[in-house]
Image (cartoon, rainbow, N blue to C red):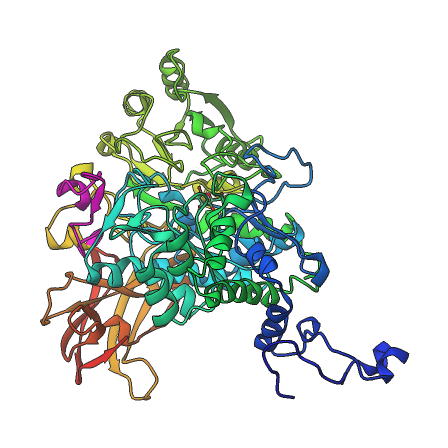
Amino acid sequence: MRRRPGRVLALLAAPVAALGALAAAPAEVEVYKDPQAPLEARVDDLLARLTPEEKLALVHADSKFTTAAIPRLGIPRRWLSDGPHGVREDVGPDTWKPAGHTDDFVSWMPAIIGLAASWNPDLARQYGEVIGQEAKQRGKDIMLGPGMNLMRTPLGGRNFEYPGEDPWLAARTVVPYIQGVQAQGVSSCAKHFVGNDQEWERMSVDVQMDERTLRELYLVPFKAAVQEADVHTVMGAYNKFRGTHACHNDYLLNRVLKQEWGFKGLVMSDWAGTHDTKEAVLNGLDLEMGTDKPYDEFFLARGFREGLARGEYPVAALEDKARRNLRVMLETKALEGRGPGALNTPEHQAVARAVAEEGLVLLKNEGAALPLDPEKVGSIAVIGENAVKLQAHAGGSARIKAFYEVTPLDGIVRRVGQRATVSFAMGYQENAAPDLVEKAVKAAAQADVAIVVAGVGHGKFFDEEGQDRKDMRLPWGQDALIDRVVAANPRTIVVLVSGAPVEMPWLPKVPAVLEAWYAGMEGGNALARVLFGDVSPSGKLPCTFPRALADSPAHALGAYPSKDGAMLYSEGLLMGYRWFDAKKVEPLFPFGHGLSYTSFQYSGLKVTPGTAPDGPLATVEFALTNTGSREGAEVAQVYVADVKSSLPRPVKELKGSRKVRLKPGEKQTVTVPLDRSAFAFYDPARQAFVAEKGDFRILVGSSSRDVRLEGAFALKETSVAR
Ligand code: BGC
């Protein structure tokens, strides 16, 4: 049957039996209600039934996190919810205050930075499935995440919600996450598009970057979210981009996202990120959320209505926005209902623990300080507020009302049971005046091992939405505390809880350091399993840890914070490890770094040109052997370096990786395909990605600075593509 736009009359076909007597007579079919009908026909049909007022109701909020129902047509109220690490507690409806519900506890998953540190796309998929199932159970239609801005500066207040500094790794993290959410019939949201890589003056700052930097770095995860994961919704960023607010920015939303990438879903504003009716109408915004006014005074409510009546805006603009909203609703069974989901199941807990475990990065391990033997350790002094602090319900919009949270101290106590004595001393405390150091030093001196759980936290000017950190140092006297503790007990292990790099002036004295990020509800258990060697650590840094803030590109160039309201990304392509490589700056820990309790040998690199017309341009193959005595997983990383090119390029760029789990002595062949994009750069003159013929070096290694194998590849032909 050919479906026509507009009101569709048709004969009942399949459901005849089900409808019994009614079905005997020809009836007007509401195609939009027929789940078997093609999606576009359903959207057309439903759109044609809406009055202009009803269409307007679809394009702006009617509470903090909802849009209005249209009961006449069976369109329910639509629920949006933060955030990337779980389904946020209910607020409002008209305030940010918690609604006080008792049924909005959920699983708290590790922060996205930790997920990225796992370098495990299968886990990212499972993570997304957990979010989708819990959202479904909580009756949410759209989950506001994952965040996919990049770590341009270690100070970014929301770095913990984002997947690090590398666009390729970011894309590989968010694509399976989105697919996992959307496979549950819940929409995902790629946020914040684009340039919200820092919180500094986020509502007003004008982000300026050259086109190549935009295309090769900051757009990459968004493009993958649209084209590979078919993400249903995109959230505009608060900041301006080249002079216009990103939430209604013609270039970003109409030209790049919708025209070039073919995005069919809806663009929503960030909350209170809309500033102008005309721009909102014409520049690609489809859903206005969070504006701080009565709902009918939203830019896409009364202003839009009045402008339409005066003939200032094309009716087609409203049609298109309503259509996009309806499409997302119908795609996710908003009208027929999507059935029950699940909350905090044993499977969800297992995924939370696996992500936490695989995201833990062992930064340093001198003299095999770790793992600890629970049978031999005797006594352990656990020190530091982050050992006992609950982290879930903080950080801004990513906060979670967790069913439970296993803290580092809980995890350690549970793991050692009666085998060792565990003491705890606060050592430092956020904003606390009393001197807690002496007790901690005493506890450390009396114990066989001291574990200092240090780091940052989700307070103002730390890992929190709305502002950036002020510096990269550990706050609240922790550096001095660690110095004293390690002086009292050289067997001191430092565990960092943070969303981004911190300076470590005490590093030479401390034998072992673990980065634990914000590790979710199972974080303490995961940490204990790694500390006591039940599992070998396998996380790798998704960001460079600089020695000092001034080594980091935006800071080295004085390109952070903003000047006269503009944030100039003057480091351009040389962001993250690209800068440290090009400028030959030694980082504290390089991008991709992470140690294991076992050791891996790389051998037998082969780079084979692809032959299939639609296949990869090259296939990288090598063998990985576990040469140590424990099982472990290695993240093998493949970097591509262009030997000579018509435009300057970074020294090398990450273009592939594989995480491989091996038993002691086990050897496995690893294959990593490299497609066109692995060789291409963006040429602003041609407005296209160019893979230029010539020689490339293929670098395979255990981190960006630990290259174990090097091969060569020659591209025979130049190709140009969008
Ligand atoms: C944040 C978004 C979030 C929204 C709704 C904004 O302040 O930037 O990431 O989804 O609030 O809570």
Query: Measured along the vertical axis of the image, is residue 424 above or below residue 302?
Result: above
**Res 148 → quadrant:** bottom left
Query: Measured along the vertical axis of the image, is residue 11 above or below residue 496?
Result: below
Q: Is residue 3 left or right of residue 569?
A: right
Q: Position of residue 550 (x, y in %)?
A: 16, 38
Q: Residue at x 65, y 49 (%)?
A: 138
Q: Position of residue 318 (x, y in %)?
A: 50, 63
Q: Residue at x 51, y 66 (%)?
A: 319
Q: Is residue 590 left or right of residue 31?
A: left
Q: Residue furthest right?
A: 21
The prevailing secondary structure element of the residues shown in magenta is loop
Query: Measured along the vertical axis of the image, is residue 137 above or below residue 19?
Result: above
Q: Position of residue 1 (x, y in %)?
A: 65, 88
Most foreground residue, 498 or 599: 498
Is residue 619 among what the camera can see?
A: yes
- Residue 558: in magenta span: yes
- The magenta segment is 553-577
- Residue 570: in magenta span: yes
Q: Residue furthest front?
A: 310
Q: Residue at x 61, y 67 (%)?
A: 330
Q: Position of residue 374 (x, y in %)?
A: 49, 36
Q: Residue at x 52, y 48 (%)?
A: 353
Query: Measured along the vertical axis of the image, is residue 554 above or below residue 377?
Result: below
Q: Is residue 477 left or right of residue 404?
A: left
Most foreground residue, 463 or 653: 463
Q: Is residue 599 left or right of residue 581?
A: right
Is residue 123 among what the camera can see?
A: no
Quadrant of the image containing the C terminus: bottom left
